[in-house]
Image: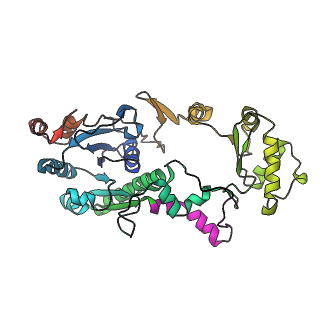
Amino acid sequence: MITNGPLAGIRVIEMAGLGAAPYTSLLLSDLGAEVIRIDRPRTVSRRPKQYALSRGRRSVALDLKQEAGLDMLMRLVGQADVLIEGYRPGVAERLGFGPEVCLERNPRLIFGRMTGWGQDGPMARMAGHDLNYLALTGALRLFQRRDSAPPTPPGLLADFAGGGLMLAFGIVSALVQRAGSGRGQVVDAAMVDGVASLTTLIHSFIAQERWTDQPESNFCDGGAPYYSVYETSDGGYMAVAPIEPQFYAELLRLLGIDPNSVPDRDDPARWPELKELFASVFATRTREEWTELFDGTDACVTPVLDFGEAVRHPHMVARGTYVSDFGVTQPAPAPRFAATPGRIAGPPPEPAENSRQALIDWGCAPAEVDDLIQRGVVEQA
């Protein structure tokens, strides 16, 4: 595996799972950490080589139900900097590798725990998904329109921002703290906590009496005409977001609208009227025509693109925001570092693809690994 980036030299164990925890591993791997994923034997994965979320790590399959398999995991823990698990509270402990056991084996270990509801609290052991965490924190209401039910956005905001990204941030912070103290710790990353943190600005606005808790009634929740999406003549859409007065003036100029002829944008009672005006104007041209008109301006107007169009957009191409590796078009590592740039360390592994070599690289004798493979403790695809 190629190692580069600001986290080069950091060794990470990822206990195989779904969703947010693997995204944490992707982020750490992209920035240089060496990540091995512990899969269960006989794991079946659909088209694993195209599953970009698993990029940049190697797969080791261990039978943790066998004493020798758990012992091998603990030997890896002794050499690791980080362990990531995304089980329900208590599962890791029941399987024999909870944080108390692992930190006793390796006091420098950062034990990263990913859950939806957290390690404690009355809902801690309940199942949940992105939509549930958005709903319980109030965040889902931010996407609601006045005359419709709350939407069901794809599982990105709670899982990946509130969960995976927050756990990566917590792990890196714990590594910084360890550099001074010499001791590891447990990082409890709950998606519900992460989403709540993301809504800090809204709570600030509520305290300042700048936000009403009603859908489509605020300046950036679809209520304001200057922060909305408008359909074009060809069925496309333009995102319009000139919040600041000078940018709003530029919008009116490019739309050919006299500022003195329109309702006061700061009067919410006039918003429906102004919204209707903007909608009628945007409906007169195609998305491409509006894109060309607003390109290079400060009017804060951009086309709404699909994923294929986003990959081909000139700005994204110029920055290399997307790359094509191992036959899959995908986002490049982010953020970017001037002195120690990250990179995709390798393709996604097949389950158990790297068991033998990874264990040898982590200090196990080849003969010992071969014996474990023969006994079914370790699986080598």
Q: Which percent across, then down, holds residue 210?
A: 68, 67
Quadrant position of residue 371:
top left
* Residue drawn 70% across the image and 40% down it: 237
* Residue drawn 78% across the image and 45% down it: 279
Residue 101 within the segment the image draws in magenta: no
* Residue drawn 20% across the image and 42% down it: 362
By secondary structure, the bulk of the magenta-drawn segment is best described as helix
Residue 199 within the segment the image draws in magenta: yes
Q: Which percent across, then down, holds residue 52?
A: 41, 37
Q: How is the image coloured?
A: rainbow
* Residue drawn 37% across the image and 50% down it: 21
Query: Which stretch did the figure color magenta?
Result: 192-216
Q: Vertically, is 51 above or below 278?
A: above
Image quadrant containing the N terminus: top left
Q: Nearer the viewer, residue 251 or 351?
A: 351
Q: Is residue 61 left or right of residue 50?
A: left
Quadrant position of residue 374:
top left
Q: Residue most toward the top? A: 327
Image quadrant containing the C terminus: top left
Q: Is residue 59 left or right of residue 133?
A: left
Q: Vertically, is 291 above or below 119?
A: above
